[in-house]
Amino acid sequence: MPSAPSLNPILSLTETAMVEVNRIIVARMQSDIDLIPTLAGHLVSAGGKRIRPMLTLAGAMVADPEGSLEGAAKLAAAVEFIHTATLLHDDVIDESNMRRGNQTANAIWGNEASVLVGDFLFARAFELMVETGHIDVLGRLSKASARITEGEIEQMLIAGKPDTDIDAYLSVIIGKTAELFAAASETGSMIANGSDALTANLKDYGMALGIAFQITDDALDYHADEGDLGKTVGDDFAEGKTTLPVMMAYHAGDAEEKAFWMRTISDGDIRDGDLAHAQALMQSHGAITGALAEARRHAEQAEACLSDLPATPARDALIETAAFAASRTV
Amino acid sequence: MPSAPSLNPILSLTETAMVEVNRIIVARMQSDIDLIPTLAGHLVSAGGKRIRPMLTLAGAMVADPEGSLEGAAKLAAAVEFIHTATLLHDDVIDESNMRRGNQTANAIWGNEASVLVGDFLFARAFELMVETGHIDVLGRLSKASARITEGEIEQMLIAGKPDTDIDAYLSVIIGKTAELFAAASETGSMIANGSDALTANLKDYGMALGIAFQITDDALDYHADEGDLGKTVGDDFAEGKTTLPVMMAYHAGDAEEKAFWMRTISDGDIRDGDLAHAQALMQSHGAITGALAEARRHAEQAEACLSDLPATPARDALIETAAFAASRTV
């Protein structure tokens, strides 16, 4: 019986290079202002899967299996800085107090510091990219950065609106998640001088992977095994986020159910037992399984982008990462 | 009798090119998400002096009086976007409701939107810089962007501390203001292929100009003629900002006066008549005239950076801009 898809192949593939990426991350978050490394370090040391920098490294290894990863490591650190800056600003926006089981930076140091350290990391990301000397990579990641903020703004605009159509949701998750997955994979190929065709394949792979990853995340928010990884159920519900399982349950629901979703997600009037009722409605309409099926469809698209490439360890690790994205439980 | 120094020479010098800069600004703040141009346009149309993009253009014209300003105009728009992004984040941080006599973006659209549109404009700034194809310019402005956030964080850390020493204040204003003035002037020269010596001169000019400009701004906050430009007296006092006139009055004051500054600036316990009393203490210790003398000293340093250059309209306009920085009343 084959074991469940995991991140182990990409973790092994990038293990050595990630040591260097982590060294760069720590070195480049330093500043004469002690608060900057303290606050940034809080988020960096809190962990997270570090998928984005691993995608950059793996993209470079697909393009040039024997090449130096020096430039790719800097780029991977820059990609992680962009992601970390986004998280810092997200927590301010969501007024979140907890992330991955830890207090958020804004809860400890205040919104001002979180906004500014986010800005600092974003600027540092561009400094790192400049050092790679690859202006096309800078162009790609500055475009991605603008698109990320568009996705976040779209997310804000559909919050509290369970009657949103699926296309608007897809645009949100492409912006807030898939665009950086795509740019991370694609620029890995670019910096390793991958062909235009390969770079385009890796972009499409990252985009489909990011969509699968985010849909799964949104489903797990109503369904996860709460374990020691700090994944908690119900955060999106409490914040009134419009995500795929909510939309699926809403659109399939009768008038009384629609009224329930409007009261909770739209009006923010959440009472004891509402989360369990929301989960029961999702169960009765197959909204979680439906969302996970949609994630699997995108994961399969991601795998297909790489299926014609030679079977190298890097390609195989990326294919298993796609399978993991749609099957993970944490 | 010579007329008072003004921005008229640099306004005339850059008038044609600024039409193009403004066109780029409007074109590049567009997005499919209507809220982005609406919110960004609120700040952009509120005016402001647009000194930073004019410095970039004038820097390019000093380096190459006959050259095309196509690249410099894109760069100038990028510099203004970085500044606008900073203002959007500042207003969130300061919890400001008014800027230049208008409601702030965060007061109208909320903190979330202001943080995200600031991020969007910052990303767009880098897209514009990439289009100039000049990676050294990108390196300079990403470094400046990191230093700006350091200055803002330092400002946060000295807020409410009138007993701060002058060096800490200088580091704040170098970060929050002078660094971008320096980078704007310097990269104008870089993009017009100015010599290394000229580029260094323009950097030093912009740095001294920015210091003079900010010290004057801080003095005017206790002293301005409140006119139709929306400049209001007392904002810094209400926010407990540690600025040069406060520090000068504090350090020169007796124990009772020091206690007054601690109660108002540090504890934020501000009562009727306190602003007038603060102004009277500044008057009695010559703190405003002392701050303005310090501004003039930096403005003269700025002028000296350009004194050995050939007397072109661009050089002369920059010299008069320095004189204006230390003598303006609005």
Image (cartoon, coloured by chain):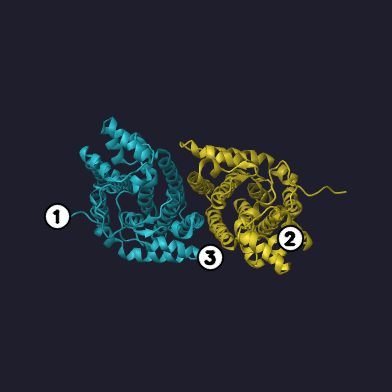
Chain colours: A cyan, B yellow
Asked if labels 1 and 3 touch by Cβ distance under 8 angstroms, the answer is no
Q: Secondary structure at mark 1?
A: loop
Q: Position of residue B181 (x, y in %)?
A: 64, 54
- Which residue carries the number 1 mark? A2
Name the kind of residue labelled 2 in the image. Answer: Ala
The disc placed on residue B291 is 2
Q: Position of residue A42 (x, y in %)?
A: 41, 63
Q: Residues within 10 Å of mark 2 (few under 14, many from 20)?
A: many
| Side of B42 where A138 appears, left or right | left
The disc placed on residue B117 is none
Name the kind of residue labelled 1 in the image. Answer: Pro
The front one of B189 and A163 is A163
Judge depth for marks 2 and 1 and give the one in front. 2
| Side of A83 where B27 appears, left or right | right
Q: Can see residue B282?
A: yes
Q: Secondary structure at mark 2?
A: helix
Q: Residue furthest bottom?
A: B255
- Which residue carries the number 3 mark? A33
Count of labels in the image: 3
Query: Please, which chain is the residue tagged with disc 1 on?
Result: A
